């Protein structure tokens, strides 16, 4: 057996002649060369323990070391996780690589390591799991979903994986979806017009293409799955990028021209999905801002909270703040949002609104009136750094 596996004899001799660290170094070299990365992690752990004056292997539970030694051990183990995870990713072994990189807690490192992995039929599901569900690189993962799975499945992925993720992740995916859907919509619309009229039409937006063709959609014609249009417009509410918001508004405009049977109702305060979305996107783009805000003020005042919660109020506060009207947003917060309301996370918090305004006096006042001692102290400390 020793002749077949000379490494056994080699490490044994090194342990006797040069010591444990030399033996483990040789083991690490051997395991790396043979791509035995799970075992490599254990060997790196041995090497770390030896370097810290601990036994190479832990036979039983050990008493806690002193704090400095514990910190060095933790850092060394995380570095070993990073090194082994990157080796797995370099070979396209996504799930195994993430098992080691996840404890490192550095999404940027993980995204860089996984960038070398090209999607294929064998690893696509694992890549989507890590990139999108785990949030390592949502933009890359969602673009991959659009390319490989198509619009319908990508919308389902957004609903299932991104609804609870941070807003920045939602923005990344929503921007890609809006561009994708708008491109498909305009291509299909142009193709239909060319077939009808015998020549390619001018115009790069749905609004341009429908401008002199008011009856094109009146008979129930549509150029993209109407449920896809509705979902895309709904997801686009998180966007701030003006270029992509313009595309979202164009999709909403097209939707508003569809036959009524294809204008599906939304949820309050976007019950009339396309008109409400046009008002919302327009305000964010600086177009008829006052009218858009009035629309959502009326919704905030008229949508019954006992049936729909405070979602309409949250949308109003969010819109006001994103339009730069932070004082009005704070006033709406104070007037319309009950202290015990269960929010959905759509509106900025009282602290976020105060930070955007650059003044915490209103937060102090609201917190005092509502008996929120923690909020009052937070505002007081912000005013007196």
Image (spheres, rainbow, N blue to C red):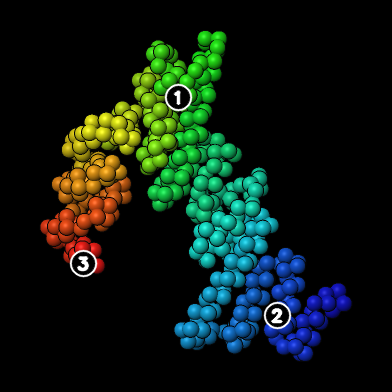
Is the residue marked by circle 1 packed among few (<14), some (14-19), or many (20+) residues within 10 Å? many
Secondary structure at numbered mark 3: loop
Q: Is residue 379 above or below residue 330?
A: below
Query: Considering only vertical position in the picture, is 212 above or below 169?
Result: above
Circle 2 sits on which residue? 24
Do the numbered discs 2 and 1 sit on residues whose CB atoms are within 8 Å? no
Expressed as whole percent of the image width and height from the top left, the position of residue 208 reads: 43, 20
Who's the residue at 64% across and 80% down the image? 47
Foreground disc of the pair 1, 3: 3
**Residue 337, horizontal then vertical, whole percent:** 19, 48
Quadrant of the snapshot with the N terminus = bottom right
Quarter of the figure that contains the C terminus: bottom left
What residue is disc 3 on?
Answer: 384
The x, y position of residue 140, in whole percent, is: 54, 47
Task: Kindly report the distance in space between the C-alpha atoms of the residues bearing marks 2 and 3.
Answer: 56 Å
Please, which residue is most extreme toward the bottom here? 17
Q: Which residue is mark 1?
A: 205
Q: Nearer the viewer, mark 2 or mark 3?
A: 3
- Asked if the residue at tag 3 contacts the one at tag 2, i.e. Cβ–Cβ closer than 8 Å, the answer is no
């Amino acid at each position: 057996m020793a002749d077949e596996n000379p490494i056994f004899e080699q490490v044994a001799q090194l342990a006797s002649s040069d010591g444990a660290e030399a033996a483990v170094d040789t083991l690490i070299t051997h395991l790396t060369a043979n791509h035995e990365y799970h075992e490599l992690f254990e060997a790196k752990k041995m090497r770390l323990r030896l370097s810290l004056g601990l036994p190479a292997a832990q036979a039983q539970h050990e008493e806690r070391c002193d704090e400095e030694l514990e910190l060095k051990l933790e850092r060394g183990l995380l570095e070993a996780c990073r090194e082994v995870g990157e080796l797995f990713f370099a070979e396209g072994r996504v799930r195994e690589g993430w098992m080691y990189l996840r404890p490192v807690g550095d999404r940027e490192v993980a995204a860089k390591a996984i960038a070398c992995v090209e999607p294929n039929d064998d690893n696509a599901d694992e890549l989507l799991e890590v990139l999108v569900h785990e949030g390592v690189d949502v933009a890359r993962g969602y673009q991959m979903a659009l390319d490989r799975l198509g619009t319908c499945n990508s919308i389902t992925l957004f609903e299932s994986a991104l609804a609870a993720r941070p807003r920045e992740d939602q923005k990344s995916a929503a921007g890609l979806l809006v561009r994708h859907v708008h491109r498909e919509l305009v291509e299909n619309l142009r193709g239909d017009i060319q077939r009808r009229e015998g020549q390619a039409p001018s115009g790069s937006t749905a609004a341009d293409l429908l401008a002199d063709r008011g009856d094109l959609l009146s008979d129930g014609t549509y150029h993209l799955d109407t449920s896809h249009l509705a979902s895309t417009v709904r997801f686009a509410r998180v966007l701030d990028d003006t270029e992509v918001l313009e595309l979202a508004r164009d999709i909403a405009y097209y939707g508003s021209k569809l036959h009524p049977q294809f204008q599906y109702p939304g949820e309050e305060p976007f019950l009339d999905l396309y008109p409400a979305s046009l008002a919302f996107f327009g305000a964010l783009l600086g177009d008829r801002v006052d009218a858009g805000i009035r629309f959502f003020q009326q919704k905030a005042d008229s949508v019954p909270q006992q049936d729909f919660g405070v979602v309409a109020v949250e949308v109003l506060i969010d819109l006001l703040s994103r339009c730069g009207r932070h004082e009005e947003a704070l006033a709406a917060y104070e007037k319309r949002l009950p202290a015990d309301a269960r929010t959905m996370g759509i509106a900025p918090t009282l602290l976020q609104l105060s930070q955007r305004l650059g003044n915490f006096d209103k937060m102090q006042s609201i917190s005092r009136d509502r008996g929120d001692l923690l909020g009052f102290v937070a505002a007081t400390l912000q005013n007196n750094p």
